[in-house]
Amino acid sequence: MAALRKLMLATAITAGAGLLSPQEVKAFELTGAWATSAEQCKKVFARKGRANQVTFTNFSGVYGGGFIVEANRLRGKFEKCSIKSKKETSQSVNMVAACASGILLSNVQFFLKILDDNTISRQFPGMEEMEVKYHRCQI
């Protein structure tokens, strides 16, 4: 009888553990090159150097521009940012980054709405009418 109780208890614990375990949250993969137009990716980004690193073309701004995300950094044509904090939900990524452009240092908030695996929208808190869509580039 004691063996049967132990078996029933073990079964109940195993069944309940699945209900109590945290759900797996899939983080959005932001790493890569992002342009304002998917059709302009090759005009905004290029691979250069021995490391074949993704960088901006000379006239990337003419074609809408974009940004590059690497580990804990963001790069624009003229800015370099270190991500200080990041909060993700299934539909958005909210980041605060310390950015440097020439002689100016500033903290910048990036609120990104995830539209699909290859499209995001940068929204500007306090300016609900303003948003910029970005598309993942396969360079």
Image (cartoon, rainbow, N blue to C red):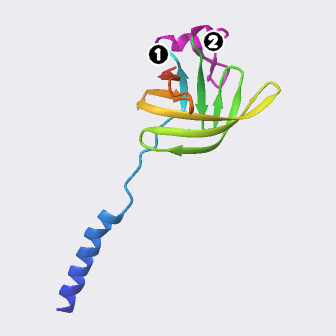
Q: Nearer the viewer, residue 9 or 121?
A: 121
Which span of residues is magenta-colored? 39-63
Residue 9 lies left or right of residue 109; in this view the side is left
Q: Position of residue 50 (x, y in %)?
A: 67, 22
User: Disc 1 residue type?
Assistant: Ala
Instruction: Give the vertical position of 2 relative to 106 (above or below).
Output: below
Magenta segment includes 42: yes
**Label 2 neighbourhood size at 10 Å, few (<14), some (14-19), many (20+)?**
few
Please tell me which residue is depicted at 50% across the width and 23% down the height of the picture. Answer: 129
Q: Position of residue 40 (x, y in %)?
A: 51, 11
Q: Position of residue 102 (x, y in %)?
A: 80, 24
Q: Nearer the viewer, residue 58 or 22?
A: 22
Residue 14 position by quadrant: bottom left
Q: Secondary structure at mark 2?
A: helix
Residue 132 lies left or right of residue 12; in this view the side is right
Q: Residue 106, which numbered label?
A: none
Residue 105 lies left or right of residue 49; in this view the side is right
Magenta segment includes 134: no
Q: Which residue is mark 1?
A: 38
Whole-Å distance between the Cαs marked 1 and 2? 14 Å
Badge 1 vs badge 2, beta-carbon distance below 8 Å: no
**Label 1 neighbourhood size at 10 Å, few (<14), some (14-19), many (20+)?**
some
Q: Secondary structure at mark 1?
A: helix
Q: Which residue is mark 2?
A: 61
Residue 48 lies left or right of residue 37; in this view the side is right
Q: Position of residue 57 (x, y in %)?
A: 64, 12
User: Disc 2 residue type?
Assistant: Gly
- Dot placed on the residue nearer the N-terminal end, 1 or 2: 1
Please tell me which residue is depicted at 59% across the width and 39% down the height of the picture. Answer: 95
